[in-house]
Image: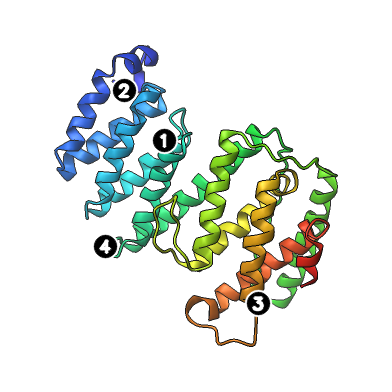
Amino acid sequence: QLRSLSNPREIAQKGDILRIFLMACSVKSVKLSVIGLSCLQKLISHDAVASSALKEILATLRDHSEMPDESLQLKTLQTMLIVFQSHLRPESEEDMSQALGICLHLLESSRSSDSVRNTAAATFRQAVALVFDNVVLAESLPTGKASPARLGSSASSVANNVTRSFGQTLSLAFSYGELTMREDLTDVGKLGLRLLEDLTALAAGGSARWLHAQSLHRTFALDILEFVLSTYVPVFRALLSYQQVLRHQICSLLMTSLRTNVELEGEAGEPAFRRLVLRLVAHVIRLYSSSLVTESEV
């Protein structure tokens, strides 16, 4: 019946059907919750849920993320991604931090299986991309994106990837030209800035107050930062607040991580972390050296 919704707007306004499925989820029975979330996904996909219901849906998903059943955790993440991609997409800082926090909780929970962790990581990556896509649109910036290459195992593969990546980067930088720097941010721009600041703090081994995350694997946070820096170049070239975070926080993190006269402990000494640091340094020099002259020289 849900597949043949004739008037999704009317269903969204009444909210009776949504209430039934939320009640099924509130019973805390795995079987009922899975059915309830599946039906909720169909309602959201058909735009048959009012935007005012977002907070209640997020509260339901947060409660389900605490339940130890793997199938329910995966269904929760699947529903979370559908929410991000729909008209229900969180727009306030409070709702977005709660939504992203659900993904991070399942990513870092000791009770999560490898399958749940991998799904949580993928969901969080896509959510971050959607946030910065919206920043580009809200701030009326150029929408071209870079395609950073991942290094292969053989020497020839490495050389080819580096050459191709460098060429793409130069082409991308040229296509943007000189963007006018501005200070004002839209609400969407401010939300993206909060996310960037917290990702930087987590990559440095600290905690994230907005995301309510005490810790996160630094390699994962650094990987997300690399994606953002290499993909959303106009954001850092045109928005002063973003460039300041890049200059004072991200570059500081990279300079500290590059030091060789100190004993590196934990993740900071692992090859995967070191490779990510070097890739980030390469992006900063290739894409932002004209505005970060001193930092690039260091």
Image quarter for residue 82? top left
Mark 2 surroundings within 10 Å by alpha-carbon count, few (fewer than 14), some (14 through 19), many (20 or more)? few
The alpha-carbon separation of the residues under discs 3 and 4 comes to 34 Å
* Three-letter code for the amino acid on which mark 3 is drawn: Leu
Task: Compute the Cα span from label 4 to label 2.
Answer: 34 Å
Q: Position of residue 74 (x, y in %)?
A: 32, 49
Q: Quadrant of residue 47?
A: top left
The crowd level at tag 3 (other Cα within 10 Å; few <14, some 14-19, many 20+) is some
Secondary structure under tag 4 reads loop
The residue identified by callout 2 is 2
The residue that disc 4 covers is: 111
- Circle number at residue 181: none
Label 2 vs label 1, nearer the camera: 1
**Residue drawn at the location 46% of the way across and 31% of the way down:** 86
- C-alpha separation, residue under disc 1 versus residue under disc 4: 24 Å
What residue is shown with label 1?
83
- First of labels 2, 1 by sequence position: 2
**Precedes in sequence: disc 3 or disc 1:** 1
Where does label 3 land, which residue?
Answer: 258
The colour scheme is rainbow
| Cα distance between the residues tagged 2 and 1 | 17 Å
Amino acid type of the residue tagged 1 in the rendering: Val
Q: Quadrant of residue 78?
A: top left
Tell me: residue 34, above or below residue 162: above
The amino acid marked with disc number 2 is Leu
